[in-house]
Image (tube, helix red, strand yellow):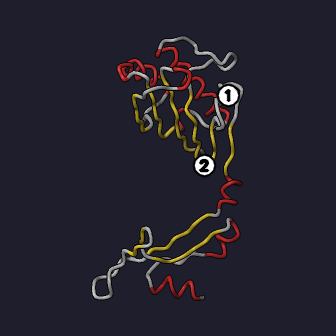
């Protein structure tokens, strides 16, 4: 087969395209790195770039592996987005606020109470998807005031077992509904 011959000439591992075709519609190709139509392959007199193999998944197949997660035990999304999305054994949880699910109002104005409620809400979304706090691999915390960092850390540490997830924390200009804190996360699913 021509594909196998090409793979051998470029010293690429063999790919069983037939098996892949049965699982997902794929496109495969061999090429050189290029940006905006400019080929980074050097001239024939200079040393050549290493070729690479490329596999792409069609967008039709992505729609079938993407699942929205929704639970009444956490506040509804405030806009055109999902509480969370499951895809490829990963869970992507949208930013969560410290709202009481039944009322849609903040638990209080304090960052401590809002942090506690955010993490409870996040826990309900994780549970609805079959995950838990120990499944979380990355969080992003957005604070209206970075001076609240220490207070948030004390509460946050109670929810995430060791090893704690990777994390980024930012002070932002504003949060929806004038929240004091918002947290999003990514979890690995079994």
Residue 185: percent from left, percent from top: 52, 36
For the N terminus, the image quarter is bottom right
Q: Residues within 10 Å of mark 2 (few under 14, many from 20)?
A: few
Q: Residue furthest left?
A: 46
Q: Which mark is residue 76?
A: 1
Q: Is residue 180 above or below residue 125?
A: above
70 lies left or right of 159: right
Name the secondary structure under disc 1: loop
Q: So how many labels did they put on this image?
A: 2
Q: Which mark is residue 89?
A: 2
Residue 97: percent from left, percent from top: 56, 24
Rendering quarter of residue 189: top right
Q: Which mark is residue 128?
A: none
Q: Nearer the viewer, residue 105 or 166?
A: 105
Q: Residues within 10 Å of mark 1 (few under 14, many from 20)?
A: some
45 lies left or right of 29: left
Q: Residue shown at 49%/76% (left/top)? A: 13
Give the mark, 1 or 2, whose residue is nearer the N terminus: 1
């Amino acid at each position: 087969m021509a594909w196998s011959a090409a793979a051998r000439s470029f010293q690429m591992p063999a790919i069983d395209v037939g098996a892949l075709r049965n699982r997902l519609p794929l496109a495969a190709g061999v090429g050189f790195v290029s940006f905006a139509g400019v080929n980074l392959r050097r001239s024939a007199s200079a040393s050549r770039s290493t070729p690479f193999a490329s596999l792409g998944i069609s967008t039709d197949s992505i729609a079938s592996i993407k699942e929205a997660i929704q639970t009444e035990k956490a506040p509804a999304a405030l806009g055109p987005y999902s509480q969370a999305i499951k895809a490829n054994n990963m869970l992507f949880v949208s930013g969560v606020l410290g709202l009481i699910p039944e009322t849609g109002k903040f638990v209080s104005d304090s960052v401590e109470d809002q942090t506690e409620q955010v993490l409870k809400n996040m826990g309900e979304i994780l549970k609805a998807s079959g995950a838990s706090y120990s499944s979380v691999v990355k969080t992003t915390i957005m604070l209206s005031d970075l001076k609240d960092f220490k207070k948030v850390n004390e509460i946050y540490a109670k929810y995430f077992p060791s090893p704690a997830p990777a994390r980024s924390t930012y002070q932002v200009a504003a949060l929806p509904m004038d929240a004091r804190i918002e947290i999003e996360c990514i979890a690995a699913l079994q």
